[in-house]
Amino acid sequence: MELKAEEEEVGGVQPVSIQAFASSSTLHGLAHIFSYERLSLKRALWALCFLGSLAVLLCVCTERVQYYFHYHHVTKLDEVAASQLTFPAVTLCNLNEFRFSQVSKNDLYHAGELLALLNNRYEIPDTQMADEKQLEILQDKANFRSFKPKPFNMREFYDRAGHDIRDMLLSCHFRGEVCSAEDFKVVFTRYGKCYTFNSGRDGRPRLKTMKGGTGNGLEIMLDIQQDEYLPVWGETDETSFEAGIKVQIHSQDEPPFIDQLGFGVAPGFQTFVACQEQRLIYLPPPWGTCKAVTMDLDFFDSYSITACRIDCETRYLVENCNCRMVHMPGDAPYCTPEQYKECADPALDFLVEKDQEYCVCEMPCNLTRYGKELSMVKIPSKASAKYLAKKFNKSEQYIGENILVLDIFFEVLNYETIEQKKAYEIAGLLGDIGGQMGLFIGASILTVLELFDYAYEVIKHKLCRRGKCQKEAKRSSVDKGVALSLDDVKRHNPCESLRGHPAGMTYAANILPHHPARGTFEDFTC
């Protein structure tokens, strides 16, 4: 009996049988499969049903895991009412870059070929297409006999010859209050000298609006000055065939990119632009494509896609042409008219239209844009044509060909949030797997822990019987053997006979008594 107890102690506590474990397990069907009964059809059917349910469970769980790792997202659309909204920045450009009256003889000498007014021999290419008055002025300016050219700067030329907002702006109202040309800030774009209303720059506060609808935004009347348009005798990148203005509505945090993102407004019409602010929230990879930490820009403090594009285009031109266009930031020298024609314009056109790899601008995770709905009516009416002609001291024909009205307002005082959300998160995955486990095999996390615990006990028992535990058992047996020998010595009590030594016999204090019938070791134990 003692030997059997020793074996149990050495091998560890033996785990319960599989039948006993199955009968107490919370895993459905296990008790019917591993029962104490002999193998029968009933047990086989239970085993078949359990394995089938387990197979279906594995298939469903695999599909759910694969779906999770596809990282799908959904888009949530919501409209949020607001008591007030920040009015957007409004940038406008005349489609004609340079006023004919402001082009001097020196300008014509340096930039005449770029503007398609002169050929490479400094001659007017086609005099038959020119207006008689314009031709006379141009012939006088194109007479370069004994002319000594002066230094020429494209930035100064754009600034001086571009349309002036003080001449273009006939009336301006914001929320019913009068505004003026001073409320517009000069900004250079690829269309030349442009103007931004409510830019929020130079310490000026961003204007807000408290109501939606017409009369609660910006309303301006402009004269596009078609009589100042340059005559068109050929085609260059600086040539415009249209009349009107280009407009972009954008956030104050991003620069205008009006040549790509602007919309046109024609003279002879009043154009209504109903806006709605849209706040976009994108997801970073792997659910989306936005970048939570955006790249640093060389020329702009805050990141936006348009800022990134302008930054990239600037670097591209500086690398390929060793100069920059007037609208580009930085400290590189401005391109000369020759560089504009031979390098800058073709290079920028190639970059915009064909090179899709050089300028890769990452989508920010938070973005504000403005949705627009445009409508228009004809102006002037027959009833108002004479009045407007008299008011502005122009002819009725001039009013119809040059005057436009632009009305920009919020349709309603709310903003729209467009947010990407994860379609399937880890909590949903765990919930689906847990639900399927409960449905098919009646298991839970605790059931899985039960199985692992039983498997651990079985494996530990088998390992202890085969390996390390047997060595420890031998070492333990040796120690116990020594202890039993000493006990046996005491149990036999050899010292009793020593106590009966002859009377009067004494021993030295440092000498152990030696009995003639006992050994030395027995004497020591006494």
Image (spheres, rainbow, N blue to C red):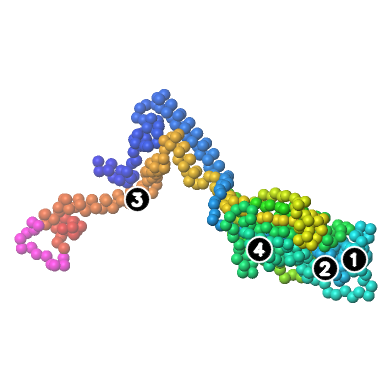
Q: Nearer the viewer, mark 1 or mark 4?
A: 4
At x 5%, y 60%, the residue is 503
Q: CA distance from mark 3 to mark 4?
A: 99 Å
| Labels 3, 4: front one | 4
Q: Residue furthest left?
A: 503
Identify the mark at residue 472; answer none if there is no mark: 3
Which quarter of the image is occupied by the C terminus?
bottom left
Q: Are marks 2 and 3 in contact (CB under 8 Å)?
A: no
Q: Nearer the viewer, mark 2 or mark 3?
A: 2
Residue 51, percent from left and from top: 46, 32
Q: Does any portion of residue 518 appear in the rendered image? A: yes
User: Circle 3 — which element?
Assistant: helix
Residue that numbered label 1 is attached to: 138
The image quadrant of residue 121 is bottom right
**At x 66% / y 55%, what residue is drawn?**
408
Calculate the distance from the C-alpha at mark 4 to the C-alpha at mark 2: 30 Å
Instruction: Give coordinates of residue 173: x percent, y percent.
Output: 66, 60
Q: Which of the marked residues, 2 or 3, is nearer the chain's N terminus?
A: 2
Q: Compared with residue 395, is residue 55 higher up or lower down, i.e. above or below?
A: above
**Label 1 to label 4: alpha-carbon separation:** 40 Å
Q: Residue furthest top?
A: 41
Task: Of the two numbered discs 1 and 4 on the same chain, state the one appearing first in sequence.
Answer: 1
Count up the numbered dots: 4
* Residue underneath mark 4: 178
Residue type at the position of mark 1: Leu
Query: Residue 506 lies in magenta, yes or no?
Result: yes
Q: In the image, is 262 to the left or to the right of 109?
A: left
First in residue order: circle 3 vs circle 4 = 4
Alpha carbon distance from label 3 to label 1: 112 Å
- Magenta range: 499-511
Q: Label 2 belongs to which residue?
A: 102
